[in-house]
Image (tube, rainbow, N blue to C red):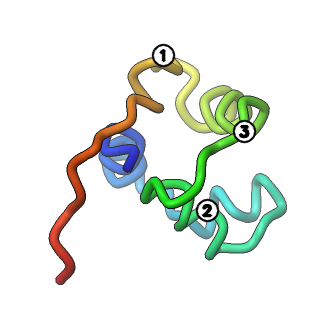
Amino acid sequence: MYRNLKAEMARSGITMVDVAEFLDVRYATVNDKVNGKFRFYYDEAYAIKKNFFNDLSMEYLFEKSDVEEPHQ
């Protein structure tokens, strides 16, 4: 899971729908990638960083966390 990416998205009011539309992929694809089920390709990660979080580092945004969030 990309905990930092999720936190920064929440802080900035950026939704997975916003990211999906920007990348021209399905919501489910972005959801699976943000939650660590599948990986982001470098070009996707770079595009997200440049478009939404230009002031943050790739290393910070896409630091992978092995801890899963509890299901609610």
Distance from disc 1 to disc 2, alpha carbons, whole Å, reads: 20 Å
Q: How many marks?
A: 3
Q: Which residue is mark 2?
A: 30
Point 69% across, 63% down: residue: 20
On residue 5, which mark appears? none
Mark 2 crowd level (few <14, some 14–19, many ≥20, 10 Å Cα): many
Image position, residue 49 (x, y; %): 60, 30
Q: Which residue is mark 1?
A: 57
Pair 1/2: label in front: 2
Pair 1/3: label in front: 3
Q: Which residue is mark 3?
A: 41
> In screen coordinates, is 67 left or right of 59?
left
Image position, residue 33 (x, y; %): 56, 56
Pair 3/2: label in front: 3
Point 68% across, 35% down: residue: 51
Does 40 appear above or below 63? below
Which quadrant of the figure has residue 16?
A: bottom right
Q: Amino acid at mark 3?
A: Tyr
Q: Nearer the viewer, residue 59 or 17?
A: 59
Distance from disc 3 to disc 2, alpha carbons, whole Å, reads: 11 Å
Point 78% across, 32% down: residue: 43
Point 53% across, 67% down: residue: 31
Q: Amino acid at mark 1?
A: Ser
